[in-house]
Amino acid sequence: MDHSSHTTLLQAGGHTNIPDRMRELLARAAQDHVYEQRTQGAVLDEIRQRLEGMEWLLREVRERELGGLSGTLETVNGRLDDIAAKPPMWAEGLAQHVEAVRDHVDAVGEQVGTVDARVESVTQRVAPLGELATMWADLTTIGGGVEETLKRLETVLDSSEGIARRMGDFAATLSQLHSSMEVAAGRFTRLDKSIAELASRTDHVEGVLAELSAGLDGRLSATAELVGAQLDERLAATQQHFGTRLDDAEHRLTGQLQDAEQRVTGRLDGRLKAIESRLDGVDGRIEATGEGFADLDGRLDGIDGRITAIDSRLTTVDQRVVSVDGRLGAIDGRMDGRFTTLDDRVAATDQHLSEAATRNEGRFNHLDNNLESLDERIGELEEHLTTRFDQVDSTVNGRFNTVDTKLAAGFETVSGRIEAVDGTVTTRLDTIDSGLDTRFTAVNSSLQTRFDTVGTRFDGVDGRLTDLAARAEQAGEQLENVDDRVEAVNQRVGQLPATLAIGERIDELLAAQTADQAQRLTAAAAALTEIVQARPDRDELTQTVTGIVHPATTGLTKRLGALEETMLALAEALLRPTRPKD
């Protein structure tokens, strides 16, 4: 007779579909969890590298560019203060040149007066001789000399007109210089605006990076601590709860099945040695006397009742598993509440950032007021320079008018009287003309060189400002990339509850306990089968045992199937991805 029905309950291949499905689900969940951990680690490493790069870039900008800009601004402010305190060198040189021209003109006027006095003395001397007839030839010669002198005086007048034209050219050069100064003032104004805008952008970028670094570190540390604490608490509580439940169930089942395992099975739930010894005792008693069959029947009836009690207790265990499911649902609700609190904290952080932006707006307004005051100072400086230039122009024009008046008076006085002074006056005027021409040429070339140098420096400053603006735009793009990565990390953190391995650990624990119990029951059933087959009246004993064990086996198989279905539903519920919160 085949006794394989005794081990139907303990055969592991009888219900392989559900465990295989659970193993497949758990393996897939483990792979997804490992992939998510690797992906999150890579994302966090990339974010950390990007933040370190941004910190290095800001440090370089703060140490190099901002220091150079601060030195440039201090130099510009010093130059503006010097310009406001004293007139430029070219104005002082011009005043010195005008004073020298006035001195030369005064000297020429004195010499003309001396020549006038000599001509008058000569006239007084020649007057008595005019009556003499013999002196007409000399007078004719003197008249020719006077005509030549008049021609030379016309030449002098032409040279004076050339001097006037050169003075006009000098006035045009002064006007060009004034326009160049206006262009330089415009460039200074644009430079101040660009520097102010760059400073505001730099302060804004530093504030945003500092706030972003602090907020990101705080949010990551808080999220990591919160998730780690929740995972540890949840795993510890779940492990302790299931360990306690399984230990209680094991102790109760062991205590209740100890009497039945003395004569029929081995040690149930970790008592195999005691059951084997008791089975040896039962075998000795069966061999010693045949009266033990009645006791065996009674005890098998007791075993049937105890198996019924075990069935009821398994029902209680099923109910407790359902209560565990409810508690896990409550834990999920708590985690949802914690994530809601985390969202509230993130909202508070956003509000704090908005308040910080408002405070920075006030600082920017204060900076704009300071820039307006600086513009007013520059306007006052321009008005002061314009007033000084007007005064210099009026002084130069008055002195030139005085010089013209004196020259006209001298020319009218000297007309018809100069004879021997022509060479000296012409030589001195040529010397003055060449000296003025040389000095005007030198001043013009020096001013042109300086303006070219200033224009080159302004072009270099404009290029550096353009580079800084490009770097600021790149920093804005990198900040946008960091915001995208932070949003991705938040989404990954929101998906963490879906990838927890609690269901896997529970299933492994149950599978280990089930496999252990199945092996033990298989060993006990094999030993009992050998003992029964060794009996001469094994057919009757087999029928009796089969009639008792088969109903209990069927009921226990149904209970185990229901328990596996329940655990499968629980695992699918744990592995089901949660809906991300807005």
Image (spheres, rainbow, N blue to C red):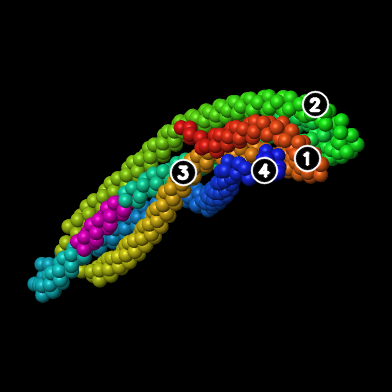
Q: Quadrant of residue 509?
A: top right
In this picture, which residue range is highlighted in magenta?
Answer: 161-181
Reading the chain from its start, which is encountered first: label 2 or label 3? Answer: 2
Q: What residue is at 88 percent from the left and 38 percent from the top? A: 287
Residue 180, magenta (yes or no): yes
Rendered image: mark on residue 484 = 3
- The kind of residue tagged 4 is Gln
Which of the two marks, 4 or 3, is nearer to us in this view?
4
Locate residue 335, reporting x and y percent: 58, 30
| Mark 4 or mark 3, earlier in chain | 4
Q: Is residue 556 magenta?
A: no
Q: Residues within 10 Å of mark 3 (few under 14, many from 20)?
A: few
Q: Are marks 4 and 3 in contact (CB under 8 Å)?
A: no
Considering the numbered disc 2 on the image, is that residue within a helix, a strand or a loop? helix
Residue on which the image places disc 2? 298
How far is mark 1 from mark 2, CA to CA? Answer: 18 Å
Amino acid identity at mark 3: Asp
> Closer to the N terminus: mark 4 or mark 1?
4
Q: Which residue is mark 1?
A: 538
Q: Secondary structure at mark 4?
A: loop
Q: Amino acid at mark 2?
A: Gly
